[in-house]
Every structure is written in structure tokens, then in C-alpha cells.
Amino acid sequence: MAYSISYAGSFKKDYKRLKKRNLPVEELEEALRILSETGTLPDTYNPHKLSGRYAGKWECHIGGRNSDWLMVWEQNDTELTLLMLRTGSHADIY
């Protein structure tokens, strides 16, 4: 069963910034596709739960485990929903 995705205003703004930086947004779109279809991401994305400001939310690394390009989202496995919160570098998000 596929997850439905919604986007916070902050995510939309981040996405526009990434496009201006000429980052390969196709990599982000591929991660979104996988996540919406399966509810999980492969280990190469290093998906993990966060603490602190984003406690209970999820983060992954777009472009591989050592990449500084992050995606942060909230996931509800009961309702099969994903709320995309932020995407960008550590400096952009934190």
C-alpha cells in the first residue's frame, strides 16, 4: 500500500533553493518515490529517527550515507501518510 505525501511550506521553499543551486533534484525525487511506495528507504540513505528539535521525525541522506544533503519528514504508518518537512544541508536545516 502506498503512502500519500504532503509538503510543508518549508520543504517547498527548500526545494526551490536546491533547484537554484543546481543540485540533482532527481535524487531527491527518487528517494520520495521509494519512500512513498515502501514506507522505508535503503540503508544507503542512512534513514534514522531524530531527537531534539525534530524528535520523532525521520532524516535521511540524499546522495549517500556521507552526503550533507538531508531530507526530514514525519511518518504516520497507521494512516500511511508522509509529511515532508525540510531538505537541504545541515547548515540549512539546523
Image (spheres, rainbow, N blue to C red):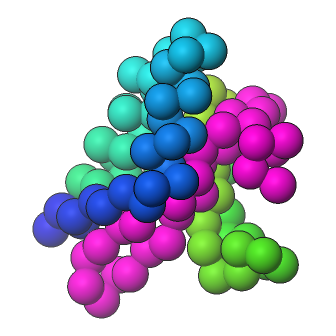
Task: Judge by depth and name the residue closer to the eye, 40 or 90.
Answer: 90
User: Where is residue 29, by image quadrant?
Assistant: top left
Left/right placement of residue 88 relative to residue 38 reads: right
Give the image location of residue 62, x and y in percent.
60, 35
Task: Judge by depth and name the residue closer to the eye, 13 or 77.
Answer: 13
User: Where is residue 75, by image quadrant?
Assistant: bottom left
Identify whether 83 is placed above or below 36.
below
- Tell me the magenta residue range: 66-94
Tell me, yes or no, if residue 68 can be seen here: yes
Rendered residue at 51%/42% (across/down)? 13
Tell me the quadrant of the picture where the C terminus can be found: bottom right
Task: Determine the residue located farthest toward the left in the rendered image.
Answer: 1
Is 85 in the magenta? Answer: yes
Left/right placement of residue 19 relative to residue 89 reads: left
Identify whether 22 is placed above or below 85.
above
Tell me the quadrant of the picture where the N terminus can be found: bottom left
